Image (spheres, helix red, strand yellow):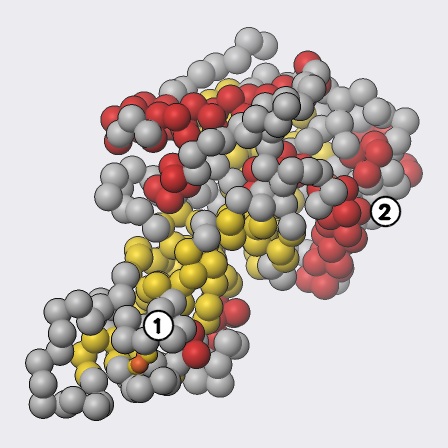
C-alpha cells in the first residue's frame, strides 16, 4: 500500500514561494536584469527585471513557443530572441517586428504571476484569486544588532514536504549529525507541545546543555523555538547556550514539482567581531551534506499515509495532519481553505 498524504496539490498555488535569490537574478545575464528560468509547482516561469519592476511570467512566447528565458530585456520589455516579439511587464506583446503596421493579435500575451522581492529573495504566487496568504515571517532579517546572510540555494531530489520534515525532525539528530549538531548519547527526543497560531505551527525544545562539550564551536545549540509558516517555511530561533546570543536559521523549501525542491536559507546572528560569514555557511553545508543522502533515499519522494509513526514523531504527525486538511479544504473553496489555515489550536502542556 502506498497512499499519498496529499492527493491534490493545487492548494500550494495559493501560497507565496521563493523561486530565486536576488543575486541569482542579477547574475543570470550580464545586463543584471535577467531573464532567468525557474520552475515552481511544475510551471516553467521566467523572471526578469523591467526597469526595477521584477516580473514573473510563463516562460513561453505565444508565437512559436520559444522559451522567453532565452530572450533579452530591452528597456521595459522582454524580447523573444526567435522572431523578436517584445512583451511588456503586463505580459502583453507590444511589438512584433515582422508586422509593425498590423494590429497586435488579442491573444498575443503570456500569463503573468504575482511577484515580490523580500529578504533578498524573489517570491511568486501562482494563484492570487483568493488573496489570502502572505510572504512568510522571517523574524531576524532586519532586527537591530543582527547580521543576516542569504545562503546558497540547493536543490534536493525530494518533495518540499520531506525536506520540511527533515529540518524539524527531532529524532534524527543523534543518528544523522553525531558530533556535528548533536551528542549521540541523547537519542530519545523530546515531545513538545505543538500549537497552531495564525497559519504557523509553533513548538519549542531545550536540548541538553552537556552536549556542548562534544560539539564544534559553530554548532548552534541552545533553546530552540520554531515558528513554521505553512506550508514550507521554518523560522528556528536559537538562544545559544554558549553566550545567550540569538542565532536564527530560516529556511523555505520551494516545490519545483512533487518530487524536487529548491531550498533557500537565511542565517541571522548577533553581530560580533571576527565572525566571518563563510564559517557559518560552511557549517550549514556540512550539516546538509549529512542529511541529503538519507532524505533523497526516502521513496516515494511524496509522503505516504502508510508510513509507521511514533509518539516522538509528533511534529511531523501534526504537520501532516494540517497539510492534508489544507489540501482537502482547498477543493471546497476559499472559505474552507481560509478556515483550515486559521484553525488555531493550543496543545496541552
Ligand atoms: S517564438 Fe517568440 S517571437 Fe516567434
Ligand atoms: Fe538534519
Mark 2: secondary structure? loop
**Residue at coordinates 25% horizontally, 26% vertically from top-left?**
335
CB of mark 2 near ligand 2 (< 8 Å): no
Q: Is residue 230 above or below residue 185?
A: below
Name the image quarter holding the N terminus.
top right
**Residue 48, position as x, y percentages in the image:** 38, 72
Relative placement, left or right, of 211 versus 330 is right
Task: Name the residue nearer the viewer: 278 or 324.
Answer: 324
Q: Is residue 192 above or below residue 85?
A: above
Q: Say whether residue 220 is visible.
A: no
Instruction: Point out which mark residue 216 bears.
Output: 2
Mark 2 residue crowding within 10 angstroms, few (<14) / some (14–19) / many (20+)? few
Relative placement, left or right, of 116 versus 26 is left
Mark 1: secondary structure? loop
Q: Say whether residue 168 is visible.
A: yes
Residue at the spot of label 1? 65
Relative placement, left or right, of 342 versus 5 is left
Task: Name the residue nearer the viewer: 144 or 120.
Answer: 120
**Residue at coordinates 72% horizontally, 63% vertically from top-left?**
278
**Residue 112, position as x, y percentages in the image:** 28, 61
Tag 2 near tag 1, CB within 8 Å: no
**Residue 14, position as x, y percentages in the image:** 35, 42
Q: Quadrant of residue 296?
A: top right
CB of mark 1 near ligand 1 (< 8 Å): yes
**Residue at coordinates 52% horizontally, 77% vertically from top-left?**
27
Name the image quarter holding the C terminus.
top right
Nearer to us: label 2 or label 1: 1
Mark with earlier residue (2, 1): 1
Mark 1 residue crowding within 10 angstroms, few (<14) / some (14–19) / many (20+)? few
Amino acid at each position: 500500500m502506498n497512499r499519498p498524504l496529499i492527493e491534490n496539490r493545487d492548494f500550494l498555488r495559493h501560497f507565496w514561494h521563493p523561486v530565486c535569490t536576488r543575486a541569482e537574478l542579477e547574475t543570470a545575464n550580464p545586463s543584471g536584469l535577467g531573464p532567468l528560468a525557474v520552475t515552481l509547482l511544475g510551471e516553467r516561469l521566467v523572471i526578469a527585471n523591467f526597469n526595477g519592476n521584477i516580473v514573473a511570467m510563463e516562460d513561453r512566447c505565444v508565437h512559436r513557443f520559444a522559451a522567453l528565458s532565452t530572450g533579452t530585456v530591452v528597456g521595459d520589455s522582454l524580447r523573444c530572441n526567435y522572431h523578436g516579439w517584445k512583451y511588456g511587464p503586463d505580459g502583453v506583446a507590444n511589438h512584433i517586428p515582422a508586422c509593425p503596421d498590423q494590429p497586435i493579435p488579442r491573444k498575443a500575451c503570456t500569463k503573468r504571476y504575482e511577484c515580490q522581492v523580500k529578504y533578498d529573495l524573489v517570491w511568486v504566487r501562482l494563484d492570487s484569486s483568493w488573496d489570502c496568504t502572505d510572504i512568510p515571517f522571517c523574524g531576524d532579517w532586519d532586527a537591530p544588532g543582527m547580521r543576516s546572510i542569504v545562503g546558497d540555494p540547493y536543490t534536493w531530489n525530494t518533495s518540499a514536504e520531506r525536506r520540511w520534515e527533515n529540518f524539524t525532525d527531532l529524532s534524527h539528530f543523534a543518528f544523522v549529525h553525531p558530533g556535528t549538531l548533536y551528542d549521540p548519547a541523547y537519542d530519545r527526543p523530546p515531545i513538545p507541545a505543538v500549537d497552531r497560531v495564525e497559519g504557523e505551527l509553533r513548538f519549542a525544545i531545550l536540548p541538553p546543555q552537556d552536549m556542548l562539550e562534544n560539539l564544534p564551536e559553530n554548532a548552534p545549540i541552545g533553546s530552540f523555538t520554531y515558528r513554521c509558516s505553512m506550508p514550507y517555511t521554518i523560522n528556528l530561533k536559537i538562544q545559544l547556550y554558549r553566550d545567550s546570543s540569538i542565532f536564527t536559521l530560516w529556511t523555505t523549501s520551494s516545490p519545483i514539482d512533487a518530487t524536487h525542491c529548491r531550498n533557500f536559507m537565511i542565517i541571522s546572528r548577533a553581530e560580533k567581531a571576527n565572525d566571518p560569514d563563510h564559517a557559518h555557511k560552511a557549517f550549514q553545508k556540512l550539516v546538509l551534506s549529512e542529511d541529503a543522502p538519507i532524505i533523497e533515499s526516502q521513496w516515494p519522494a511524496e509522503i505516504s499515509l502508510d508510513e509507521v509513526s511514533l509518539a516522538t514523531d509528533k511534529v511531523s504527525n501534526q504537520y501532516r495532519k494540517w497539510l492534508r486538511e489544507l489540501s482537502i479544504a482547498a477543493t471546497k473553496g476559499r472559505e474552507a481553505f481560509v478556515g483550515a489555515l486559521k484553525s488555531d489550536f493550543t496543545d496541552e502542556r
